[in-house]
Amino acid sequence: MVTTATLVQQAQCGKLDAYNTLVLRFQDMAVGYAYGLLGDFHLSEDAAQEAFLIGYTRLADLQDPAAFPGWFRTIVRSCCTQTRRTQKPTVPIDTAMDIPQDTH
């Protein structure tokens, strides 16, 4: 099994397969951590996806490839914070159905 640090180094050299492997390796952690912060599965998936995009664009900034897990977790947390700030209030469909309808 290839180490995370090796995958990060390969991804930093432009190997997309290496970053894809990192995504597969860390996607459950990212969504699970985001769910713990947001409490909504779909928002958690969105935050994780955004974190992977940001992680890819900032991968060159990571000086210690072995630090990827903690570094990436920080990006996930940041995406969740942004999601909470921009999240619009929602109404459950059951509640929305209780709104009186115009019968004309």
Image: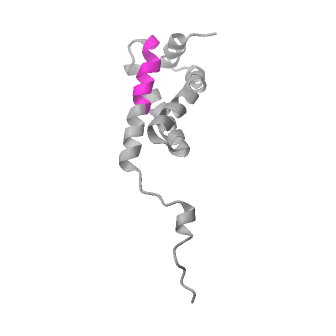
Residue 47 in the image: x percent, y percent? 47, 39
In this figure, what is the number of numbered marks?
0
Look at the picture and state if 26 lies above or below 34: above
Q: Residue 72, how many percent across, how many down? A: 44, 24
Q: Residue at x 59, y 25 (%)?
A: 20
Q: Which residues are magenta?
A: 65-76
The reply to whether the magenta stretch includes residue 43 is no
Quadrant assignment for the N terminus? top right
Residue 79 x, y percent position in the rendering: 41, 37
Of 70 and 33, the residue lying toward us: 33
Q: Who is closer to the viewer here, 64 or 27?
A: 27
Q: Is residue 29 above or below residue 85?
A: above
Q: Residue at x 35, y 47 (%)?
A: 85
Q: Is residue 59 visible?
A: no
Q: Relative to residue 81, is residue 52 drawn left or right?
A: right
Q: Residue furthest right?
A: 1
Indicate the colouring scheme.
one colour
Q: Is residue 86 above or below residue 25?
A: below
The percent position of residue 102, horizontal first and vertical second, equals: 54, 84
Res 33 seen here = yes
Our reading of the magenta stretch's main secondary structure is helix
Residue 69 lies in the magenta stretch: yes
Pick the quarter of the image with the C terminus: bottom right
Q: Residue at x 54, y 80 (%)?
A: 101
Considering every residue shown, the one lying at the far bottom of the view is 104
Residue at 38% of width from left, 49% of height from top? 86
User: Residue 80 or 49: which is nearer the viewer?
Assistant: 80
